[in-house]
Image (spheres, helix red, strand yellow):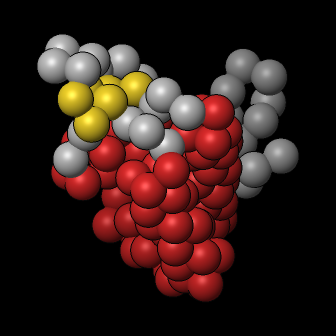
Amino acid sequence: MDDAGNEVVRARIQPRQAIAEFAKVLWHLRAILAMLLILFLALSAAMYSVGGAVDTATRTPSSVGQTFYFCAVTALTIGYGDVIPTTTLGRIVAVSLGLLGVLITGVVTASAVYAIQVAARRAGLRLD
């Protein structure tokens, strides 16, 4: 008992159980995650074909690898600026990639929080 008269619980969340729950949640969301991945690949292809991505150091059109790198960096909301889109459609695709990245981050973060909550309940912790 603590000073307020509440019972102190000494339960602990097992990391292995929390990771297993997280994997289970991601498995249940696999269709959504696959759809988001397909959308990312489609936007990457659109960026390569109509985005006019240019390497800022050399001012030459970017390669497939550089364009994919730009799309990944944009979706992760890092944005180094070493490759940039030069067309209006490319800029629209870049904004869409940024929004997609925020959506993916939210889904994965919510999944992790839910998994930890489930692991905590199984460990006997009350989540009030």
Give the answer, above or below, for where 123 lies relative to 49.
Answer: below
- Indicate left or right for 66 with 109 as reference: left
Left or right of 18 on screen, residue 82: left
* Residue beneath the point at 83% across and 46% down: 128
Quarter that holds the N terminus: top right
Question: As drawn, is 112 to the left or to the right of 48?
Answer: right
Picture layout, residue 66 above or below residue 21: above
Q: Residue at x 40, y 26 (%)?
A: 84
**Camera sees residue 115:** no
Q: Is residue 6 visible?
A: yes
Residue 90 pos. (x, y %)? 55, 39
Residue pushed farthest left? 58
Q: Residue at x 64, y 33 (%)?
A: 88
Instruction: Please state if 37 lies on the left or on the right of 20 as rendered.
Output: right
Give the total of numbered labels.
0
- Residue nearest the viewer, comparing 120 with 98: 98
Residue 70: percent from the left, percent from the top?
Answer: 35, 38
Q: Position of residue 103 (x, y in %)?
A: 66, 49
Q: Nearer the viewer, residue 6 or 20?
A: 20
Q: Nearer the viewer, residue 118 or 92?
A: 92
* Residue occupying the point 80% across, 22% down: 4
Query: 7 and 56: which one is in front?
Result: 56
Q: Quadrant of residue 73?
A: top left
Q: x%, y% of residue 79?
A: 41, 24
